[in-house]
Amino acid sequence: MLGQTDSSELNYPEQETIYIAGLWRSLGALVKLTPQNYQQAIQASHLDPQLEPKAVKLSRGEYLELSLAEQKALGEMVCLLCQQHRELIRRAVALLEQMINQNDDPWQTTLLGKYRDRLHRLHPKLTTDQVTGLAERNLIALLFYSSTHGTQRLQLCHNITADR
């Protein structure tokens, strides 16, 4: 689970699995994902329907070992879901930015407070400060991957390609 393992001890595929899992957890903490969301993402990406249970487990905080093909497919799915929920992600990032600029606690707002609380339930061993940092970083990552070219960005930034 993220925050429990020193990433320098992990091999590269494990680090990428943790990163993909972190995106799923953060998206699941911000957006109420339904079985229909998973199914639509699988169909739109022409992916194996057997990935749905893994996506659900990742978004609920379970750790799974993933093959390179699964990393790539689940990365595509999370990017597609980020694109589908782009407005909510943008609203959350804008609210975070606004509150920070006003020197107010962004986590006192309903949207961001619930997001951080849900994320903290998925990472119970982390301190509130650690979860806050994770929430901020992953919210920006979700925005980054919600763009039209989010999947390509994820694959390029994290070298999740079939020929690795």
Image (spheres, rainbow, N blue to C red):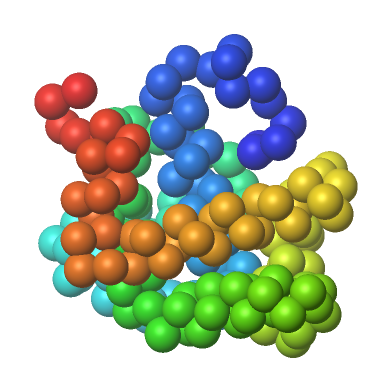
Would residue 1 be found to the left or right of residue 129 on screen? left
In this rendered view, identify the residue nearer to me: 104 or 159.
Answer: 104
- x 67%, y 83%: residue: 111
In this rendered view, identify the residue nearer to me: 4 or 146.
Answer: 146
In which quadrant of the rendered image does the N terminus lie? top right
Residue 49 location, x and y as percent? 27, 60
Would residue 27 be found to the left or right of residue 112 on screen? left
Q: In which quarter of the image is residue 50?
A: bottom left
- x 31%, y 39%: residue: 157
Q: In which quarter of the image is residue 110?
A: bottom right
Inspect this view and state whether residue 144 appears: yes
Above or below 34: residue 21: above
Above or below 43: residue 13: above
Total count of labels: 0
Above or below 116: residue 36: below
Residue 160 location, x and y as percent? 27, 35
In which quadrant of the rendered image does the C terminus lie? top left
Inspect this view and state whether residue 124 appears: no
In this rendered view, identify the residue nearer to me: 100 or 25.
Answer: 100
Residue 152 location, x and y as percent? 20, 50
- x 26%, y 50%: residue: 153
Residue 53 location, x and y as percent? 44, 57
Would residue 124 be found to the left or right of residue 89 on screen? right
- x 61%, y 47%: residue: 62
